[in-house]
Amino acid sequence: MPASFAAPRTLPELLTELDGEATILAGGMTIMPLLNRGIGRAGKIVSLSGIPALRGIARSGDSVRFGAMATHSEIASDPIVAEHVPILATAAAGIGDVQVRNRGTIGGVAAYGNAGADYVTALTALGARVVVASRRGSREVAFDRFVLGLRRTDLARDEVIVAVEVPSTSGGRTAFERYFRVQGAAPTITAAAVLMPDRGRLAVGGATPTPVIVELGREFDLAATLDAVDEACAGRPFGDAHNPAPYRRAMARNFAARVLRHAREEQPC
Ligand SMILES: Cc1cc2nc3c(=O)[nH]c(=O)nc-3n(C[C@H](O)[C@H](O)[C@H](O)COP(=O)(O)OP(=O)(O)OC[C@H]3O[C@@H](n4cnc5c(N)ncnc54)[C@H](O)[C@@H]3O)c2cc1C
């Protein structure tokens, strides 16, 4: 049982609750099972559910701004996302099951920092930015510098993710794929490719503590790019009993090839 529970209605109210001891509750899909098992601090819970300012998906200049409480279901079905960042809709649609997609949020995934998670790989490839706030002010962090390691992020105990901003990929070519062993469970490997007229980026998650990133020029050599993925996986191996590191490394190369081929061949989105 938590010692206290707060449900602020505005961002200023929320920030006064975040004293460095509070545990933030978003969709609860990750934190509730942990707390139920006695893992983590349950002293003071602060829910984000009642704060309208953290909701919504909207255009913001050349980017799409996702309120931290945008759910996976909302992202999977939003017309702005479908038009401007379709790989995020694809990633959202594949997460967990209906319950997880209806409750789980983009802010919760970003804050948890699980390197293999669908959004983590997609947001890394997309060059997303995380907007963070605390009583001390607000700041923006590039997503590829926000996730620091396995379930480790650049988020202080008194900070909250307010939004995630993602550059539009209109006029570019993109692809996202996930590999999972059990339907409804978290993926083993995720891969995303973003090929824009002036830049390109490949990200592969699940074989290393943070996603492998390979920057791509207008023209790139597929074999050399896959060798770069392989080398990065060998240098920072990550694995577990079900999916050991050599297996993940092989699948990372495989899925990198799939998204790169897919992105090169598809029509501009
Ligand atoms: C059965 C199951 C299957 C799943 N399958 C997948 C999958 O296939 N792919 C995938 O990517 N994920 C998967 N997940 C994880 C899912 O996407 C969760 O929704 C997500 O990890 C956490 O989002 P949440 O909103 O539920 O966060 P919560 O569980 O509420 O919070 C997670 C953590 O983030 C913190 N937090 C939450 N929001 C914020 C914020 N705005 N600012 C600062 N800190 C915050 C919390 O304090 C907590 O530490 C699965 C989960 C389950 C239970």
Image (cartoon, grey):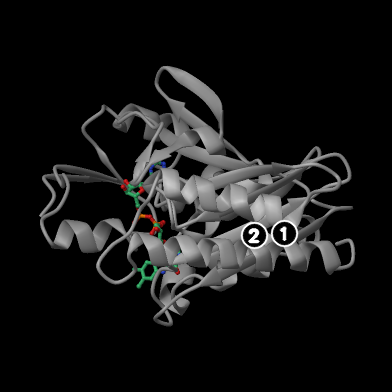
Q: Percent position (x, y) of residue 215?
A: 69, 41
Image depth: mark 2 or mark 1 in front: 2
- Amino acid type at image mark 1: Val
- Amino acid type at image mark 2: Leu
Taking the spot 13% from the left edge, 50% from the top edge, the residue there is 2
Q: Nearer the viewer, residue 68 or 219?
A: 219
Q: Residue 81: which numbered mark, if any?
A: 1
Image quadrant in which you'd find residue 74: bottom right
**Classed neighbour count for the residue bearing mark 1: other residues with Cα under 10 Å, few (<14), some (14–19), many (≥20):** many
Label 1 sits on a secondary structure element that is: helix
Ligand 1 rendered quadrant: bottom left
- Which quadrant of the rendered structure holds the N terminus? bottom left
**Classed neighbour count for the residue bearing mark 2: other residues with Cα under 10 Å, few (<14), some (14–19), many (≥20):** many
Image quadrant in which you'd find residue 32: bottom left
Q: Residue furthest top?
A: 136
Q: Percent position (x, y) of residue 77?
A: 66, 70
Taking the spot 63% from the left edge, 55% from the top edge, the residue there is 226
Q: Are marks 2 and 1 in contact (CB under 8 Å)?
A: yes
Q: Nearer the viewer, residue 213 or 246?
A: 246
The yes-or-no answer for disc 2 within 8 Å of ligand 1 is no
Label 2 and label 1: CA atoms lie apart by 7 Å
Q: Nearer the viewer, residue 91 or 22?
A: 91
Q: Earlier in the sequence, mark 2 or mark 1?
A: 1
Judge whether residue 50 can be spotted in this image: no
Taking the spot 21% from the left edge, 58% from the top edge, the residue there is 34
251 vs 6: above or below: below
Q: Residue 88: which numbered mark, if any?
A: 2
Taking the spot 55% from the left edge, 38% from the top edge, the residue there is 143
Q: Percent position (x, y) of residue 59?
A: 76, 46
Judge whether residue 23 can be spotted in this image: yes
Image quadrant in which you'd find residue 163: top right
